[in-house]
């Protein structure tokens, strides 16, 4: 199973493809260099397979690479960052 995380700016979200099929996404609202993440969804066919964690990890890696920051209004992303404190430096208070 191969994962690919890509930003879809037209839809204001990051998407994860599993073997070239859309398996989930995490939506955001852009506020300058800060992205406010509001919702994450994984297709039920891909739940409990690590797809959500791969999506959030890949998203946060891309944001780090470009020097961005995040606000987490999405519970899934908040819990992911709590379990992976190496991403905590990306989190800022609501702009």
Image (cartoon, rainbow, N blue to C red):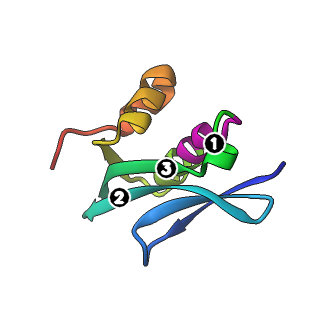
What are the residue bounds of the magenta stretch?
Answer: 49-57
40 lies above or below 8: above
Q: Position of residue 15 (x, y in %)?
A: 56, 60
Task: For marks 2 and 3, give the one nearer the viewer.
Answer: 3
Q: Which residue is mark 1?
A: 54
- Residue at (43%, 36%) from the top-left corner? 76
4 lies above or below 86: below
87 lies above or below 3: above
Q: Position of residue 29 (x, y in %)?
A: 29, 61
- Residue at (28%, 42%) from the top-left corner? 73
CA distance for labels 1 and 3: 12 Å
- Res 94 → quadrant: top left
Task: For marks 1 and 3, give the one nearer the viewer.
Answer: 3
Q: Which residue is mark 3?
A: 41
Q: Earlier in the sequence, mark 1 or mark 2?
A: 2
Q: Which residue is mark 2?
A: 28
């Amino acid at each position: 199973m191969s994962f690919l995380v890509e930003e879809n700016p037209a839809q204001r979200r990051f998407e994860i493809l599993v073997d070239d099929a859309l398996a989930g996404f995490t939506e955001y609202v852009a506020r300058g260099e800060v992205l406010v993440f509001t919702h994450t969804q994984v297709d039920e066919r891909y739940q409990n397979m690590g797809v959500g964690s791969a999506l959030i990890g890949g998203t946060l890696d891309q944001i780090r690479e470009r020097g961005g920051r995040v606000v987490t209004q999405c519970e899934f992303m908040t819990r992911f960052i709590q379990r992976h404190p190496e991403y905590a430096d990306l989190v800022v208070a609501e702009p």
